[in-house]
Amino acid sequence: MPFTGAARLASIAPREVGRIRGREIAMVFQDPLAYLNPVMTVGEQIAEVLRVHMDMSRGAARLRARDLLGMVGLPKPGDRLGDYPHQLSGGMRQRVLIAMAISCEPKLLIADEPTTALDVTIQAGILGLIGKLQRELKMACILITHDLSVIAGLVDQVAVMYAGRLVEFGPTETIFEHPRHPYTQGLLESLPRVDEPAGRRLKSIKGSPPDARRLPTGCAFHPRCPHAFAKCSSERPELRAAATARHLLAGRTSRSAVPVRSKTMRPPRIQTCPMMRPSANRS
């Protein structure tokens, strides 16, 4: 039975989840050296995915692995098949992980901090590659990141999470120009801005993130929130429409309750590499 994305994975039998994982939903992790098998060549590891999920022969899987390495931009892909992970650079290892993830042409690709350990120029290449493959393979992509410049340059919609809970969701432009949740506002106000004079002191969010094992009651952000009131410590807010039906907020929806940016204050101008910017016809 093909996976449509409408079912909750927690309610599906383990064997069926195993079929979906890798075939319908794939993931790119932030540290490829930790997730690649150090005693198997990269060619063997890609071919193994194809043999398990696509029922390919050894020969066909090896040829497909070579094509995939070329697709993700590795030079001389045929020679790379016999390399072990430690023989490759960080950027090359990340491209191998991407090749493994897209090998079965999944419907959904989850990229978890895919550029954390890479320098800026390599980051731009990896993000540009993910965007290119997403368009070519027509797959959905969830990008997990702390880098707001990546969010501004790549995605269509933003989900802001705090302590494992969704606090705000909406189109990228709306989130950056009209943030409604105090945590989202704090994140954006902590950014250095190119349209303000040098020497401006950056704002910070007071306090520290909570222990995930002992989350505060009510809204998890209330101990750090400048707009918290009594109910915040006792009632956990649910997502509801904010300014529009596409903009969701966990908390109060009144404009007077949670101030938005001043109309005279432009949204943060975040510089992004041209390779990271989506095409005009993004879906």
Image: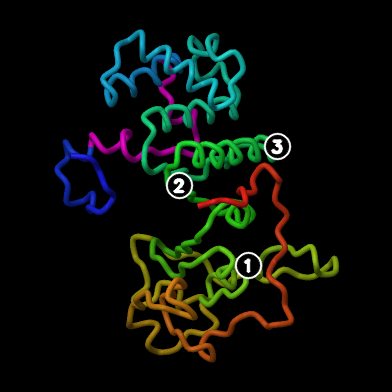
Considering the numbered disc 3 on the image, is that residue within a helix, a strand or a loop?
Answer: helix
Q: Nearer the viewer, mark 2 or mark 3?
A: 2
Task: Give the Cα separation between the discs numbered 2 and 3.
Answer: 22 Å
Can you identify the residue that label 3 sits on? 121
Q: Which of the pair 205/70 is nearer the observer?
A: 70
Considering the numbered disc 1 on the image, is that residue within a helix, a strand or a loop?
Answer: helix
Task: Give coordinates of residue 234: x percent, y percent.
Answer: 33, 83
Task: Give coordinates of residue 189: x percent, y percent.
Answer: 66, 70
Residue 172 in which image quadrant: bottom right
Using the image, determine if residue 90 lies above or below residue 12.
above
Task: Give the Cα separation between the discs numbered 1 and 3.
Answer: 24 Å
Q: Residue at x 42, y 27 (%)?
A: 100
Magenta range: 18-40
Q: Which of the pair 192/243 is nearer the observer?
A: 243
Q: Residue at x 67, y 42 (%)?
A: 275
Can you identify the residue that label 2 sits on? 141
Outermost residue to the right: 198
Q: Nearer the viewer, mark 2 or mark 1?
A: 2
Task: Give coordinates of residue 103: x percent, y percent.
Answer: 40, 27
Can you identify the residue that label 1 sits on? 188
